[in-house]
Image (cartoon, grey):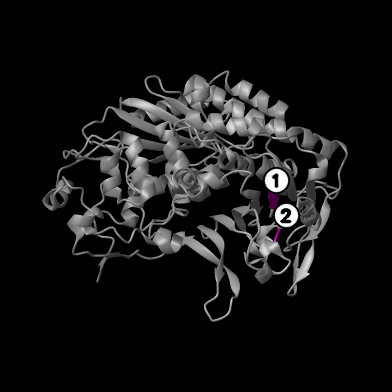
Amino acid sequence: MATVFSSSTTHYGSSVPYSRSSSSLNGHHQRIGFSSSSSFQERVLPAKVSLQYVRNSHQNMVLMQDGAVATTATPVGNETPFKKLKEGLLSGTSSEECKNAAGFDANENESTVSITVVGASGDLAKKKIFPALFALYYEGCLPEHFTICGYARSKMTDAELRNMVSRTLTCRIDKRQVWPFLLLNCDEKMEQFLNRCFYHSGQYDSEKNFSDLDKKLKQHEGGRVCNRLFYLSIPPNIFIDAVKCASMSASSGNGWTRVIVEKPFGRDSESSAALTKSLKQYLAEDQIFRIDHYLGKELVENLSVLRFSNLIFEPLWSRQYIRNVQLIFSEDFGTEGRGGYFDNYGIIRDIMQNHLLQILALFAMETPVSLDAEDIRNEKVKVLRSMRPLQLEDVVVGQYKSHTKGGVTYPAYTDDKTVPKDSLTPTFAAAALFINNARWDGVPFLMKAGKALHTKSAEIRVQFRHVPGNLYNRNFGTDLDRATNELVIRVQPDEAIYLKINNKVPGLGMRLDRSNLNLHYAARYSKEIPDAYERLLLDAIEGERRLFIRSDELDAAWSLFTPLLKELEEKKIIPEYYPYGSRGPVGAHYLAARYKVRWGDISLEQ
């Protein structure tokens, strides 16, 4: 039986409240249904927390200056604050359990976290960063005292920022949550979050403007120990100016200061090294968090769990049993107005050198000494340094052209008004990479990434070797690839892990087919998968660097791709053209065939 709650709970706002009706966001009052449960206390409440405590805990609330609602109740337990917090968020616990696991104690108000989104008026901030911060707040996974400040050159008031941000916020509803834990509904949570959001206009290269930002942050920090996180959601050509000003004029005087840097991290080895050198003039390496949001994807983070916690996989994870590994990224749309930015980088820099190469390193690394960030990153660097230099003959590049389908004409890449008509920038690339070490010697790692293809997906495909002397070869005919076991990790969309096996079709005859042992996340887990930015922002607040890129990792990645990129550009290699909405250039199939591989995503049985 479902109980329906409407927007009627008392709002505890800040001393400068932001009033917003539900209709301004959703057009009507939002109603959220939650399942009741007869075994509520047994399923949801921590063992040492009584139902009476939950009913009464919200009555002793104190309004803080920064908008926080403090309570005299102290959570049970002595867990480490952020380690258990993240486990709670990502394993699907309720928001109250998440708070308890995090060790958030309203009486311990000596510290606060100020998160400044530099470039707050940009698309990334609006579509990803602010929604991710709200999701963390909604789950109860931000500290008791926090402030979010948008910083950009645009003139904007606090109210205008809040109105802009409110249009992108949504609530994640967990069906297992029940009424005592939902004292505040979605709209009221949004109002509380928006009351913590402020705006400061300024230039990215002005120390005075950042000094004024510092004063504004101090007003909201209320004399507490202040920890400050700056998210640089700005073009790379102004990274250094912003970092310099933030470091000199707005860094914390009594807590930590950290900076999240978005890709691209340069265009090649030289520019990347120059960027790193400039950043380190103002920041220590442990203050720099180079974000690659693909490392925050649920299925990517699950790679090490799948391999190192399941006995059946680790013994097979080598050249003895694996025939090839495919890392595939495809988008079903073109540049769509971003051509000016994209044309300066291309698909290799935009996707392969970072997203796919990072996944490859995680997949192929040796067992780390521990789950400590440095131990994991050490193993990733070893993989990258062991890779064979990329040769031009092992790479295929393409560019999408105009195509008419179903009466609709799709534009070519060079039809984008922001792209030069004679551009040779690849929108598609396929490459064969090899790792020269004992575990992976001779195994082709095939990468493929492209825009304007037939589907949108990202997946890892592990094709195993043929069974030697297979007794059932005659049942598959001459196409032995049909009898090959394949492990597929679908990163997005519709996350899943499935293993293709051979199986006898029920009946009196001996007919075989391929079946999937399937872990479909949507069917198995009721909890919505957190966005990658939520995980990475939480890690940055915690100081967990495992999913962020270290400077020597970056150097090794660029060392692999820079010679190839220079050769492509110096020789002005003409890309192979492919129709918008197709499966990509034919050359990619010839590249795979050279290593006796068939792309897994084009077979009839995907």
The location of residue 27, given as percent across then percent down, is 41, 64
Q: Against 12, is 22 above or below?
A: below
What residue is drawn where x is 75% and y is 74%? 407
Dividing the image into 4 quarters, which one contains the C terminus? bottom right
Q: Is residue 353 visible?
A: yes
The tally of labels here is 2
Residue type of the residue flagged with mark 1: Pro
Task: Give the CA separation, mark 1 to mark 2.
Answer: 9 Å
- Badge 1 vs badge 2, beta-carbon distance below 8 Å: yes
Q: Which badge, 1 or 2, is on the more N-terminal residue?
A: 1
What residue is drawn where x is 43% and y is 47%? 162
The extreme left residue here reads: 52
Q: Is residue 160 visible?
A: no
Within 10 Å of the Cα at label 2, are there few (<14), some (14-19), or many (20+) other Cα atoms? some
Q: Which residue is mark 1?
A: 444
Q: Which quadrant of the figure has residue 348?
A: top right
Between 390 and 86, the one nearer to me in the picture: 390
On whether residue 541 falls in the magenta region, the answer is: no
Between 150 and 398, the one nearer to me in the picture: 398
The extreme right residue here reads: 571
The location of residue 537, given as percent across then percent down, is 45, 39
- In the rendered view, does 422 fall on the left or right side of 78? right
Q: Against 207, is 523 above or below?
A: below
Residue type of the residue flagged with mark 2: Val
Q: Which residue is mark 2?
A: 597
Q: Which residues are magenta?
A: 445-453
Disc 2 on helix, strand or loop?
loop
Dividing the image into 4 quarters, which one contains the N terminus? bottom left
- In the rendered view, does 223 fall on the left or right side of 502? left
